[in-house]
Amino acid sequence: MFCKAILFFFVFVTVSFSFELNEFEGHQNLNKHITIFYDANDQYTIQNLPKEQFETTDNLALGYVKGAIWSKLEFTSTSSAKILLINPKININTIDIYVFEENNLVKTHKLGNYRNIAQNSFSSKFTNFSLEMEPKKIYTIITKIKSKSPIDASWFISDTSTFLSFVMYDILFWGVFLGFIFSLIIYNLSVFISLKEYTYVAYAFHGLTALLFQFATNGIFYQFGLYDNPLIFNSVSWILAQLSIASILLFAVFFFNTKKTMPIIHAIILGLFLIVFGMIVLFLYSFFDVEIITIVRSITKPLSIFIILFVLLIAIIGVKKQMRGAWYYLLGHGIFLLAIVFQQFGGIINNETSFISVYIVAIGILFDVVFLSLALGKNIKSLKYEKEKNEKLLISQSGFSAIGRTIGNLSHQWKIPVARLGSLITQIEAILWKRDDALKYELEEILTKMHSNLHFMQTSISEFNNFYLHSSQKMEFNLSNEIESIIDILGAKIMYTNATISKNLDRSIVIFGYKSAFANICLIIIDNALDILKQREITNGNITITLVQEGNSFKLIIEDNGGGISMEPITKIFDVFVSDKEDGNGMGLAMVQVLTNERICGKIEVRNSEKGALFEIKVPLTMQGK
């Protein structure tokens, strides 16, 4: 075997790209002296390599390669020295190294992350071996590289002290990376405990999966001997990659509340979740069929890039909608994407794997998690405001419910006396019926008025009772009838304000939903309009109510002629404690927005028309609110 190898290299070296290795300090790139040969079917050994097939190349960052790659490096030593040769690509599975001195095979190394890390000259995730050179000797190094991860045939030469310093700084970098990410995870989990906002849990999950994925792909687990099984290495690394992608989608869902703010985007995200889950299942299956990794990997790489680009699109939509923290989100994921692009294509552009490419994605992740944390920080004030707003609205709704219970008790207490009063009036009418004098005719007119007022009392009690009844139950009801009931309830105030109500109601619209929520919305908007008309002393005040059906939705428009809303932006009118009325408490329209968005699952808009304020509410015919 050795004789065949010597004979082969005696001929082979005559066409080699030999160079003279002089004294040096630090490290030196040897790529321009390397030639390669593609062994697509992995059929050759060191004894039968075809010399004519080796060729030069400008690009040693070869990416995914079927079969094996052979490389050849030859140099002449000028002095005695001990050097290290290092391959900069992490996670290459197997590298078989054959060292020839003066065409004699003197050493063989079996390296790569499918082998024990102790077989390297120095225990490091970077493949390395030492060579003790004698002066004026020709050294030829042949390597056979096989890997399911991207291949790089580059070699660096370094002295021991430089390499050990680099390894120390590498460990320091990943230690800082671990501490930084982990501290942000702990911080955001503590914020979650305080605010009970699941966006912070999604952030922690994103940080954790990114951390574990970087440790797997950058050889940290391998360097510290956390797993030696090649099958586990391949499967776990790609499962962590898919979990990291899933965490990016999950954080986008919670941060932008896509279910409410971007329903179409939300549906697409759910589809992507299913695809990512399918990829995870296939990688789990690879524990039993390792060859499937190559097939699934060809899908997951473009899928991952697509998802990151898709999330960037979500961030751009968020910026366009002026959502709080969207700019920070866009910057974080934008830098992360640029880092991935640099790592994936930097080797193609630079024709080699640079050491910066080892850290570029980790640096991108650091920027990503920092900017996402800033985005969440931007939201803390908003979340506190929303929490306070919801608490105030809850208090207001509790008061509303208390009023309902009180009116319910009053209506129950009043029914009997009112009924008895009606009986007494009927008894008086019966007594008077037998008489035929002036008193009879005088009392008949009075009794008619008493009947009318008694009927009004009974109707009012019934209307108020129905208004507050079944506030948490869905039921079928006619929208126009409910609007008429609200107008009747506010009848006295309408008369006092000297206003008129113009109605254009589609009386055929019947829906199944929360009757009390719809009634509350109408009551608050109309009542506010009456207050503005009174406050601004509008003569011939008018409120126009329009109810129409549009496809599978109905549209309710309430417009007054009170001169409009003066504040800018006009949507601020829906904020808690903000009111356009002199004595307003700023709770009514805030409750209207909550009831519209959450209770009847609709959308409310406000704008100023030529006459005054115009509120437009659009709701699906089947309310799906909670």
Image (cartoon, helix red, strand yellow):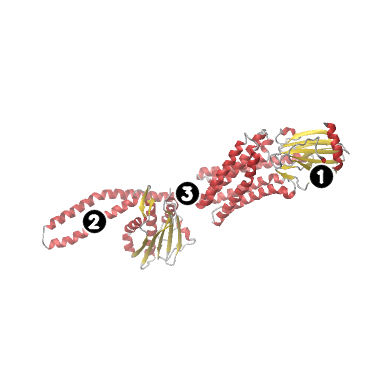
Question: What crowding class fits label 2: few (fewer than 14 Cα within 10 Å), some (14-19), or many (20 or more)?
Answer: some
Pick whichever, 117 or 288, lies toward us. 288
Pick whichever, 47 or 523, lies toward us. 47
Vertical placement of 22 versus 497: above or below? above
Which one is closest to the eye, mark 3 or mark 2? Answer: 2
- Residue 334 position within the rendered picture, expressed as x and y whole percent measured from the top left: 62, 51
Residue 68 numbered mark, or none: none
Residue 387 numbered mark, or none: 3
Pick whichever, 582 or 141, lies toward us. 141
Q: State left or right for residue 309 relative to residue 7.
A: left
Specify the quadrant of the image occupied by residue 161: top right
**Residue where numbered disc 2 is placed:** 454
Question: What crowding class fits label 3: few (fewer than 14 Cα within 10 Å), some (14-19), or many (20 or more)?
Answer: few
Which one is closest to the eye, mark 1 or mark 3? Answer: 1
Badge count: 3
Vertical placement of 274 versus 582: above or below? above
- Residue 304 position within the rendered picture, expressed as x and y whole percent measured from the top left: 62, 46
Specify the quadrant of the image occupied by residue 459: bottom left
Query: Could you tell which of marks 2 and 1 lies nearer the N-terminus?
Result: 1
Amino acid type shown at disc 2:
Leu
Amino acid type shown at disc 3:
Lys
- Residue 325 position within the rendered picture, expressed as x and y whole percent measured from the top left: 56, 52
Query: Could you tell which of marks 3 and 2 lies nearer the N-terminus?
Result: 3
Secondary structure category for the residue under label 3 = helix
**Residue where numbered disc 1 is placed:** 33
Q: Is residue 490 visible?
A: yes
Specify the quadrant of the image occupied by residue 506: bottom left
Amino acid type shown at disc 1:
His
- The residue lying at 78 percent from left, 43 percent from top is 36
**From mark 1 to mark 3, how far is it between C-alphas?**
66 Å
